[in-house]
Each structure stands twice: as C-alpha cells, then as structure tokens.
Image: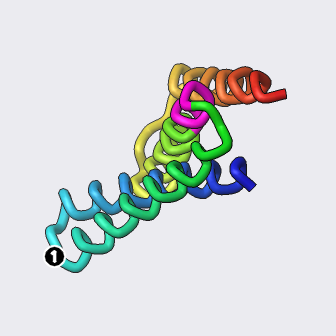
Amino acid sequence: MAWIALFVAGLLETAWATGLKVAADKFSIGLIVATAALMFASLAALYWSMRSLPLGIAYPIWTGVGSIGSVIVSFVLFKQQVGIVSIAGVVCLIVGIFLISLETQ
C-alpha cells in the first residue's frame, strides 16, 4: 500500500507543478488555492508512504515520478519541444527509479 501512496504522491506532485505553471501564465486565486491543496495532498501521501519506506527510497522516487510526469505534461499540454537529450534524461530517471526501488526487495 505504501508504494501506491508513493506513486499517487508523485502524480499529485505533477498536478501541483502544472497548477503553478498555469497560475504563472494566468493568475487565479482559485487556482492558487487548488494548487496548495494538491501540494498538501502530495505531501500527505508522501508522509503516509514514508511510514513504511525509507527516506532514501521514498523521496527520490516521489521526485522522479513528479519529474517524469512534469515532462509529459509539458510535452502534451504546453507543447514544449522534447528532443533526444530530454528523452534520454527521462529514460535515465525511469532506470534510476527502478534501481532505487530494488533496495526494498
């Protein structure tokens, strides 16, 4: 269950980062409040997962899932150009997340 909470925390990190970008482009107090709620929810899910998972595993995976999600959102929603170097970076993140997760086995 801790792994599910950790993955959800990473997805929520992507959501609040997206909210910050949208708010930076077009300010809305409602969007800022929603983004803050997503931040809180992400940290709560991370906290819950850390009750069972070590810091050195949970935190890097949380930031990795959020980073990968942010790149995907930037590409899909914001039409950011993604080149071969960016793709290689995302692949490295995925491999790194996988390798870090092996420490719990």
Quadrant where the N terminus sits is bottom right
Residue at the image point whose x is 49% and y is 53% from the top: 73
Residue 90 screen position, x and y as percent? 59, 29
Q: Is residue 26 above or below residue 71?
A: below
Quadrant where the C terminus sits is top right
Judge whether residue 37 is colored magenta: no
Specify the segment rendered in magenta. Answer: 55-61
Judge whether residue 59 is colored magenta: yes
Residue at the image point whose x is 64% and y is 50% from the top: 7
Q: Is residue 8 above or below residue 93?
A: below
Where on the picture, by quarter, is residue 35? bottom left
Identify the residue position indicated by label 1 in the image. Answer: 29
Residue 29 screen position, x and y as percent? 16, 76
Where on the picture, by quarter, is residue 34? bottom left
Residue 61 screen position, x and y as percent? 59, 35
Q: Main secondary structure of the magenta part?
A: helix
Residue at the image point whose x is 39% and y is 54% from the top: 78
User: Front-most of 35 and 90?
Assistant: 35
Three-letter code, disc 1: Ile
